[in-house]
Amino acid sequence: MQLVSVLNRLAIFGALWVVLTGGGVDSLAYGAAAVAVATVLSLLIYPVDRPGVVVWRAAAILPRFLVHSGLGGLDVARRAFDPRLPISPGWVDIPLSSRHDAANVLLGGLISILPGTLPAGPGDGEMDIHVLYLPNFTPGEVQADETRIHGLFDSRITEYGATHG
Amino acid sequence: MADWFTLVAIFLLLTVAAALVRCWRGPGPVERIMAAQLAGTGVIGVAVVLGAARGDAAFLDAALIGTLLAAIAVTAFVRGTAKPGAKE
Amino acid sequence: MSWIDLAVLALLGAGLAFYAAGSLGFLRFPDTASRLHALTKADNLGLGLVALAAAIYGGSLAVAAKIALVWLFAVIAAGTTSQLLARRARLDEARLDDADSAPDGGLR
């Protein structure tokens, strides 16, 4: 299981190198060294014994991510162009079920592209979120996204208090 | 077609220039670093568009470096200016 | 002009519009965090659209993959740096509120 994770990372960094260099044969020796160093660094920063994101699950929510990114951009653009400037900003604190920092930062990244919400990072078991138009805000959506993010990880994420769908 | 891409690059630079008014007015340091980030996203767009117009992939390398440097600049700003005693 | 050219032009125009919206929101919105909304959402969508136009126009898989990489890094960077900046904006606001409520008016 852990060996598979290491091989996965080698494959990802290898693919990254090929895209960056166009796959030139003369750069392969440097690439092998760079990929090895990158993999070791990533293992030091985030060891494989911690909950990992399952790649195909992340790929599966990509369409949803793209649609939401479009909706989020449209919403803020509409408000920026409207002469009446229809915004009603404020902060809300949403409790988080998990104490897993990496998952919570990922959740913050997802929330930051949704229409009208911008998180100020996870802290103290809650997420401070800046809302552009308070009357439209529903806390339930954040909790639904939290479950969705936890679902991207393997089952070890439940050790951090996450509910795993 | 390449002319259209060049034209778009010029207009992209104009949107960056407009946003720099906020950098001038502030009021705070966060506005100024945000203006820098906006200029970063704008210039990355310019590099991608000009790269397409000229068929030169070197512009994309510049765009990649720009993306990474913009992220590092913002992180350095936030880490470097955190006030003592502030909730982190 | 083929329909692919038309699609590329439409993507460029839409991308430019979102860049303009980002700058406009950055200028018009009343508080720091709201301005960050414009920056994070509109500008990055604008980048995504012009990048898609460039990838289609580029016509090669290698170029498209590299453009996709630029976009991916930009999205990841925006998702994390926007949280850092929002946290900083929130702390600044809280400090201002404290200063307002302090008996001597506070110092800043």
Image (cartoon, coloured by chain):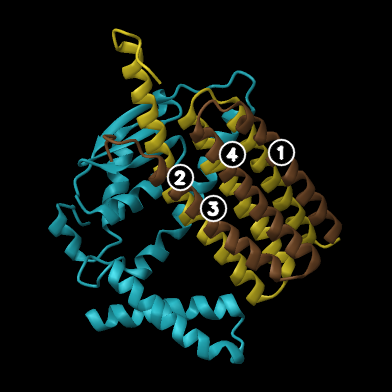
Q: Where is residue B58 in the image (x, y as percent from the top left)?
A: 70, 70
Q: What kind of element bears circle 1?
A: helix
Q: Which tint is chain C?
A: yellow
- Residue at 73% x, 45% y is B13
Tag 4 and tag 2 share a subunit: yes
Provide residue C107's location: percent of width, then percent of height. 37, 17
Sequence-wise, the earlier of marks 3 and 2 is 3
| Upstream in sequence: badge 1 or badge 3 | 1
Q: Distance between the residues labelled 3 and 2?
A: 11 Å
Q: What residue sits right under mark 3 in the picture?
A: B70
Please name the color used to draw chain B. Answer: brown
- Chain letter for the residue marked with disc 1 in the picture: B
Q: Mark 4 points at which residue?
A: B35
| In the rendered image, residues at marks 4 and 1 fall on the same chain | yes
Where, quadrant-wise, is the N terminus of chain C in this rendering? bottom right
Callout 1 amino acid: Ala
- Residue at (73, 69) in percent of width and height: C58
Residue with the mark numbered 1: B17
Q: Observer-nearest residue: B18 or A165?
A: B18
Residue C29 seen from this side: yes
Side of A104 relative to A99 (left or right): right
C37 in relation to B74, above or below: above
Amino acid type, residue under disc 2 in the picture: Phe
Badge number at residue C50:
none
Q: Do the residues labelled 4 and 1 touch (CB within 8 Å)?
A: no
Counting residues from the start of the chain, the first of labels 3 and 4 encountered is 4
Which one is earlier in the sequence, the residue at label 4 or at label 1? Answer: 1
- Mark on residue B77? 2
Chain on which label 2 sits: B
